[in-house]
Amino acid sequence: MTTIAARLASCTDPKDVYAAACPCRDMLDLLANKWSALALGALEDGPQRFGALRTRLQGVSPKVLTQTLRRLEDYGLVHREVFAEVPPRVEYSLTDLGADACVPLAHLRSWVELNIDRFSEAS
Amino acid sequence: MTTIAARLASCTDPKDVYAAACPCRDMLDLLANKWSALALGALEDGPQRFGALRTRLQGVSPKVLTQTLRRLEDYGLVHREVFAEVPPRVEYSLTDLGADACVPLAHLRSWVELNIDRFSEAS
DNA sequence: ACCATTGGTACCCATTGGGTACCATCACCG
DNA sequence: CGGTGATGGTACCCAATGGGTACCAATGGT
């Protein structure tokens, strides 16, 4: 097992997203992802159930949503709480780190919406 | 052929990255991508040749770099200029739109570098 | 004659993104 | 007492595609 701390220590030029071996690269890959950006943004409104997120993120399949949320949970951006009820209830919420990550992601999302008219047409 | 303008018009709730059919979704997918974010950031320093970009974006393969740059060019974020020389010289530079897009992406990159220590270890 | 340089492309492969079908459980209704 | 609905997934399967390596074209320099 390789912890993030260990990888940072063994990284000759730490904290540089342009270095292939730097864990920053992995974190950028995690955040610079369509579904991650949308999921974190949705959770800014407060804790959400799986079904609510699925509705909000139009077009996402349950499998992909699960993958996305679990990955965010693994890295400490999202908290997952299961309630022992029937039918099952699972609530996802932002951790402090996740809430902080929302700031730059929100900028990115709103930049896209504000500038969509300026894009060229795809070939 | 479907232009962005046409797709925007036919989109019931325009300019919403959460709508599956909105072109904003595609643009978010374009920008919320590891290599796009790194390539645009590299070009902030001024026009760069293919080889320089390849060196800067450690770990990128030529094929993937080409794909990334061409896609950015298709959507009007990057300008590609070929000089009729031997050996060939190709310079990539930011368009005005690309330069604007760099702002939120730079925030994202620097946020990652500043907060890397706070991430949990991956499972 | 031969090599180095540059910006790719051709080809191939494994990973994985992604979709659909299905499940387990219990409350509730008839 | 059987049927139905709600919920949060997982199992399974597949095409796409991300990605790597090998190679090329063209010419100036030695």
Image (cartoon, coloured by chain):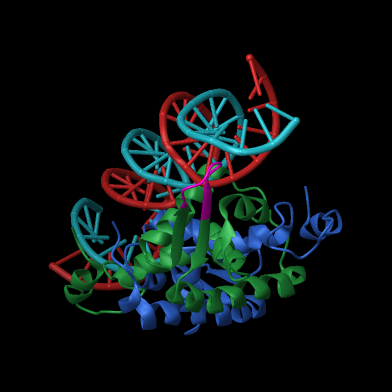
Chain colours: A blue, B green, C red, D cyan
Q: Residue at x 43, y 75 (%)?
A: B97
By secondary structure, the bulk of the magenta-drawn segment is best described as loop
Residue A87 visible in the displayed image: no
Q: Quadrant of residue C27?
A: bottom left
User: Which quadrant holds the N terminus of chain B?
Assistant: bottom left
* Magenta range: B83-90
Q: Nearer the viewer, residue B2 or B62?
A: B62
Q: Within the magenta stretch, is there residue B89? A: yes
Task: Identify the residue shown where x is 86% and y is 58%.
Answer: A9
* Left or right: A40 in relation to B113: left
Q: Position of residue B116 (x, y in %)?
A: 73, 68
Q: Is residue C3 above or below residue B43?
A: above
Q: State the image coordinates of residue B60 (x, y, percent, origin top left).
A: 60, 48
Is B46 colored magenta in this rendering?
no
Q: Residue at x 41, y 57 (%)?
A: B71
- Residue at image coords 51%, 60%: B92
Tell me if residue B79 comes above or below residue B57 in the rendering.
below
Residue C30 is left or right of residue D9, and the answer is: left
For residue C17, side relative to residue B55 (left or right):
left
Residue B99 placed where, x, y %? 50, 75
On screen, residue A118 above or below B29: below
Residue situated in front as seen by the camera: B112 or A54: B112
x and y percentages locating residue A21 in the rendered image: 73, 52
